[in-house]
Amino acid sequence: MSYDPRNARFAPLVSFPAIAVLGLALVAIGCGSSEEETEQFESQQAVSPTASLEYKVDSLKNETRRLKEQLDAMAAENRNLTAHSADLETRLTDASKAPAPAPAGDVMSAYTAALDQFNRRNYSDAAQQFQAILSSGTDRFVDNCHYWIGESYYGLRKYNEAIKEFETVLGFAGSGKRPYAQLMIGNSYAMLGDRASAREAYDKVVSTYPSSEVVEKAKEKIAKFR
């Protein structure tokens, strides 16, 4: 049918079938783009939880390692503190067991009382009292106490023990008891029947302490061996 400009104001530029085809094409294009975006979103949603979980696991591992290092450091410090505490406890225990030094006046009184027991021939009590003075931690009369303990043992006929105490006295340089201790060593060996050792001890009195008053006694003992 021919178009008559007189019968219509406007002429259709595109026919309806063409518009329909164009619309379907646009819909198709739009649907394709939406599907692609949906697939990408779903793909991201599928990957993201795994990546997030792996990140959390790594973070937990690092935190666990850090905490373990702190615990190890604390355990080492605790061991050091325990060892230090044990050392201090040992020192305190030893200090508590150590006898406190006796006052000077008490030491003199105790020494006089012990000598009194010896003069009374209470040798066992005398030895104990002299030993108590030594155990008190005092530095007074130490050589004298050892000497009188030796004399007490000699009186109790414990000659070997007496010799040990007299030999201890010899170790105190400058002690006035050394010549007497040397003489008593000879007497103790003589009582044990060891004449050779007794003679040797008496000879040392004469040679080592020639100006001592006990030299004459030593010579008298030596003369008996001839």
Image (cartoon, grey):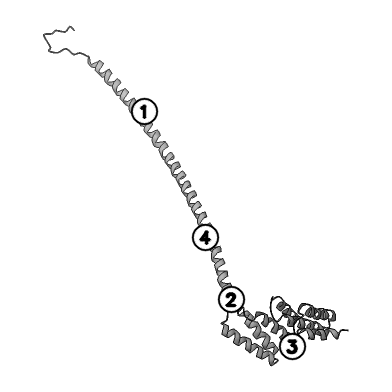
State the image quarter where residue 194 is shown.
bottom right
Q: Is residue 117 above or below residue 52?
A: below
Task: Using the image, tell me which numbered label, if any, was put on residue 36.
Answer: 1
Residue at figure coordinates x 55%, y 69% from the top left = 89
Q: CA distance from mark 2 to mark 3?
A: 32 Å
Q: Which residue is mark 2?
A: 97
Counting residues from the start of the chain, the first of labels 3 and 4 encountered is 4
Q: Is residue 39 above or below residue 148?
A: above
Residue at the extreme right of the image, as rendered: 226
Q: Secondary structure at mark 1?
A: helix
For badge 1, the amino acid type reads Glu
- Answer whether labels 4 and 1 touch (C-beta < 8 Å): no
Circle 1 crowding by C-alpha within 10 Å: few under 14, some 14–19, many from 20: few
Q: From the viewer's perspective, is 115 left or right of 226?
A: left
Q: Which residue is mark 3?
A: 155
Q: Position of residue 31 (x, y in %)?
A: 32, 26
Q: Secondary structure at mark 2?
A: helix
For badge 3, the amino acid type reads Gly
Counting residues from the start of the chain, the first of labels 3 and 1 encountered is 1
Q: Which residue is mark 4?
A: 78
Q: In front: mark 3 or mark 1?
A: 3
Q: In front: mark 4 or mark 1?
A: 4
Q: Secondary structure at mark 4?
A: helix
For badge 2, the amino acid type reads Lys
Q: Is residue 124 above or below residue 56?
A: below
Residue at figure coordinates x 48%, y 50% from the top left = 66
- Answer whether labels 3 and 1 touch (C-beta < 8 Å): no
- Tell me the quadrant of the picture where the N terminus can be found: top left
